[in-house]
Amino acid sequence: VKSKVLIVDDELINLTILEDLVTSLGHTAILAEDGVEALTKIMESKPDLILLDLMMPALDGFGVMDKLKNRPEFSDIPIIVQSTMDDKESIIRATKYKPKNDLLKPFNPDVMKTRVTLHLEKSRLSATIKKQKEKIDSMTEGFEQAVKDGAGALGKAYEKLVLLNGVNVQALKTIDHL
């Protein structure tokens, strides 16, 4: 399944490497050079995964995550944060936003491919489960309504049966008196 992956990094070399990596996996790469551009692209294309550099000019990765955290329509997009090796504090700070993974730069391409594939598959499976749950909930509502309707019809039929039984009893009494 072809997915959309937003790559956000202010360094052109990283954008190029990650774009090649993402497209080699058969996915579409969407590029943004800073957080402001990233938010625009998120609104426009709702990517399936975000590879997010934490340290950027203008709006950094923390700012992007901060803007997304209260937007339910984007809460299901997995985010893999990236930062330089000497910036472990940023990775720790990022955990409050609950990214799906973190990678230190320079990253290992094989590890990145594995994580991209893993998180896209998890996201796809979660979406499938969510759709199936919605379908089950809808079917359950339909069944519950059918039972209520059936119970109502059954109740009316019972009332008619009782009424007819009363008529029959009256008729039998009348016949017995003849």
Image: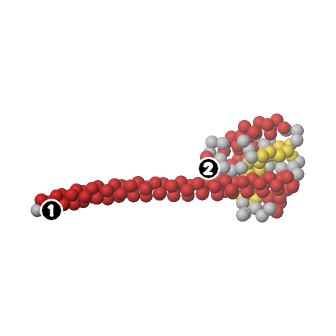
Tag 2 secondary structure: helix
The amino acid on which the numbered mark 2 sits, given as a three-letter code, is Glu
Q: Nearer the viewer, mark 2 or mark 1?
A: 1
User: At 85% across and 44% down in the image, what residue appears?
Assistant: 104
Taking 83 as reference, is 170 left or right? left
User: At 32% across and 59% down in the image, what residue appears?
Assistant: 157
Residue 101's disc number = none
User: At 72% across and 42% down in the image, what residue appears?
Assistant: 98
User: At 36% across and 55% down in the image, what residue appears?
Assistant: 152
Taking 91 as reference, is 44 left or right? left
The amino acid on which the numbered mark 1 sits, given as a three-letter code, is Ile
- Give x and y (percent) for residue 45: 66, 56
Q: Which is more toward the observer, 110 or 177?
A: 177
Based on the displayed image, in which of its 4 quarters is residue 131 positioned? bottom right
- Give x and y (percent) for residue 163: 24, 57
Q: Which residue is mark 1?
A: 175
- Give x and y (percent) for residue 16: 83, 57
Q: Which residue is mark 2?
A: 73
